[in-house]
Amino acid sequence: MANLLNTTLKHCYKPLFIGLIFLFSGAQQQQSAQWGFAGHQRINEFAVYLLPLELQHFFITHQHELIAQAVAPDQRRYIQEAEACRHYIDLDFYYKRGENPFWNLPQNWQAAKDCHAEDTLLAHGIVPWHVVNMKYRLQKAFEQKNLALILKNAAEIGHYIADAHVPLHTTQNYNGQLTNQYGIHGLWESRLVELEANNYNYWIGKATYLKSVQQTIWQAVAASHAALDSVFLFEKLCSAQIKEAEKYSFEQRGSVMTKVYSQKFCQAYHSKLNGMVERRMRAAILMVSSVWYTAWVDAGQPDMRQFNENDPLKIEAQEKDSLPVMLNRWKQRSCH
């Protein structure tokens, strides 16, 4: 498990707040959390509005919990070793440039384990497989009419689906550290969202039933990975066109003066991306809502008015499954 520990540490140093893109201590920079807290919360918030009426009233009634718990997986990464690998997948570890990224990476968990060592899969991220597992957890919560677990699993699957829609969550070069573009992670998914998200259009139709959550999440990962070249290329172009002194600025964040990408640089980068961040957020919102709906349908479409609160201690105990136990359960399930 040495590879898993090293990669876990690699992906766990991201700070918790959307605006703190760069907090300098000497020459050190820290990377912001995925989509930023506000981005994750916004995705869960708007996913509620895409649901059919049978579900929408229930989810709107509990929208506060869905929004508040949207960031719980990021909070756990700092105290649970097994958490970090659930947020990303290093696709470029599995292929050489010019090859099909998925030629030797099965979508089914057991097939993937048969093809690669389990330690390898964990070390390089399992987000698409974990989304499938979380769908089953949410479906089970609906079947059990366990309100607290419905809200917990719905909120958290929203987080993992959102992460899968971030291009930089599909590469070993997740923060530009391999191409001298250090900090690009926070730039793309937090700073741009911070500056531009209020201008995005989040009304994108209605949730639909997904015949295969497995296929849908892998399609999302593939779309994220396909956008990766543009993410890096346009940052390089903007860096070449804008002077270093104009690339960064300082903003007061609480009691700390923080170095951030300047609004001028962000506007130029956002313009070159031509709506990419908005498109990935919209796609994430639609998939989150559709997975919620699919889990409910597959649970037999229970009447949401019959649900009652459950013992929180019992819920906590149910959620303390270790990753090995969880993965072992996958062996006994056909992938949906």
Image: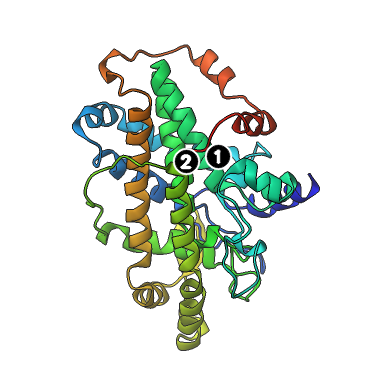
| Whether residue 285 is situated above or below residue 103 in the rendered picture | above
Q: Position of residue 282 (x, y in %)?
A: 32, 55
Q: Position of residue 96 (x, y in %)?
A: 65, 71
Q: Quadrant of the N terminus?
A: top right
What colouring method underlies this structural image? Answer: rainbow
| 11 relative to 233 in the view: left or right | right
Task: Give the secondary structure at mark 1.
Answer: helix
Task: Give the secondary structure at mark 2.
Answer: helix
Mark 2 lies on residue:
71
Farthest residue toward the right? 2
| 231 relative to 108 in the view: left or right | left
| Residue situated in front as seen by the camera: 256 or 207 | 207
Farthest residue toward the left? 53
Q: Is residue 72 visible?
A: yes
**Amino acid at pointer 1:** Gln
Which numbered tag is attached to residue 294?
none
Cα distance in 3D space between marks 2 and 1: 7 Å
